[in-house]
């Protein structure tokens, strides 16, 4: 179970370039004990934002990457056999509730349905977590905050958040940073100069324009950072772009050729 989540504690705030008033909004929600939902495409900075905010607010952070096999027990905890004895082991959500930490459920719609049931009593003013297996009913410690993210772009009708769940959160919309901001972010993250990052960001803009036509998803800021990091490490520009900004987007040879043409038009 420990492999499914990560804990951040007392870290220096990781670099995060704000796009708007999201820092103030998150701080206000945190001060009022309100849960927050971050909507936006993959790789646009949601996870980094939460890590930054947790450090700023000086709260521990449990990050859980949700997947289609993740169940309520993975979040709450379970009895495990240890040295011949059965012991109860708290899951990341229970730990966050006890410690007054932020619990971040990344891509929450991926998780199994029983997870949303657990979240409901935690997201209203009761702030309780019933643990059926131990008979406990935990009241969230001060500082506990539930944050979830999801990507509304995936056109999967089975995997959207039900209104009864989403209407329990203050929601914030994220998108890829504007070109100037993305250039700063990628330069900061990769160590490549802004002058060399700028054409990568222009290319990213062109690739994103193809979303819904040739590409299911546009290129993420994460991938632009990868390309810039490879170039900063000495890789040939075209090779780096191919590996980090084209191959991850599609398997279709025709589409790849079209994308390479976009690269040639920019460089
Ligand atoms: P998401 O959680 O939305 O899938 P991440 O938060 O993991 O995406 O972002 C991917 C990468 O993009 C980060 O590791 C970071 O390098 C970079 N990034 C994106 N937006 C920002 C931002 N506003 N400030 C700093 N880094 C950012």
Image (cartoon, rainbow, N blue to C red):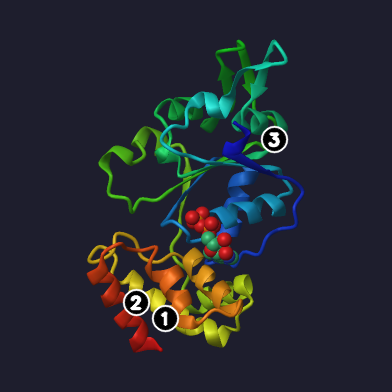
- Ligand 1 visible in quadrant: bottom right
Q: From mark 3 to mark 2, how far is it between C-alphas?
A: 43 Å
Residue 152 picture location, percent across and down: 35, 50
Badge 3 or badge 1: first in the primary sequence: 3
Residue under the point 36% across and 63% down: 249
On screen, residue 135 above or below 205: above
Residue 107 picture location, percent across and down: 45, 44
Whether the residue carrying mark 2 lies under 8 Å from ligand 1 is answered with no
- Please tell me whether mark 2 sits on a helix, a strand or a loop: helix
Residue 51 seen anywhere in this rendered image of the structure: yes
Residue under the point 35% across and 70% down: 208
Instruction: Tell me if mark 3 has few (under 14), some (14-19) or many (20+) residues whose alpha carbon lies within 10 angstroms of its own.
Output: some
Return the residue at label 2: 206
Which image quarter: residue 112? top left
**Is 208 on the left-hand or right-hand side of 38?**
left
**Is 181 on the left-hand or right-hand side of 175?**
right
Residue 126 seen anywhere in this rendered image of the structure: no
Badge 3 or badge 2: first in the primary sequence: 3
Which image quarter: residue 49? bottom right
Q: Which mark is residue 202?
A: 1
Instruction: Tell me if mark 1 has few (under 14), some (14-19) or many (20+) residues whose alpha carbon lies within 10 angstroms of its own.
Output: some
On screen, residue 76 above or below 102: above
Whether the residue carrying mark 1 lies under 8 Å from ligand 1 is answered with no
Which image quarter: residue 195? bottom right
- Please tell me whether mark 1 sits on a helix, a strand or a loop: helix
Residue 87 picture location, percent across and down: 68, 15
Q: Which mark is residue 169?
A: none
On screen, residue 183 above or below 10: below
- Please tell me whether mark 3 sits on a helix, a strand or a loop: loop
Q: Nearer the viewer, mark 3 or mark 2?
A: 2
Instruction: Tell me if mark 2 has few (under 14), some (14-19) or many (20+) residues whose alpha carbon lies within 10 angstroms of its own.
Output: some
Return the residue at label 3: 100
């Amino acid at each position: 179970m420990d492999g499914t989540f990560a804990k951040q504690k007392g870290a220096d705030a990781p670099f995060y370039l704000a796009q708007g008033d999201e820092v103030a909004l998150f701080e206000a929600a945190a001060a009022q004990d309100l849960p927050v939902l971050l909507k936006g495409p993959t790789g646009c900075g949601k996870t980094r934002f939460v890590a930054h905010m947790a450090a700023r607010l000086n709260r521990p952070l449990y990050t859980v990457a949700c997947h289609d096999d993740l169940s309520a027990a993975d979040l709450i905890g379970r009895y495990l056999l240890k040295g011949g004895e059965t012991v109860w082991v708290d899951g990341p959500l229970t730990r966050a509730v006890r410690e007054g930490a932020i619990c971040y459920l990344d891509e929450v719609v991926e998780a199994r349905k029983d997870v949303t049931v657990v979240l409901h009593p935690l997201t209203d003013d009761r702030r309780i977590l019933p643990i059926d297996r131990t008979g406990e009913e935990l009241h969230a410690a001060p500082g506990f905050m539930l944050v979830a993210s999801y990507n509304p772009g995936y056109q999967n009708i089975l995997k959207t958040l039900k209104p009864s769940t989403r209407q329990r959160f203050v929601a914030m919309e994220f998108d890829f940073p504007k070109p100037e901001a993305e250039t700063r972010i990628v330069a900061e993250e990769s160590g490549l100069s802004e002058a060399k990052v700028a054409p990568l960001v222009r290319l990213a803009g062109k690739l994103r324009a193809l979303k819904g036509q040739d590409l299911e998803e546009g290129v993420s800021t994460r991938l632009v950072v990868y390309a810039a990091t490879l170039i900063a490490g000495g890789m040939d520009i075209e090779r780096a772009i191919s590996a980090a900004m084209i191959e991850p987007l599609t398997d279709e040879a025709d589409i790849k050729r079209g994308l390479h043409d976009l690269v040639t038009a920019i460089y």
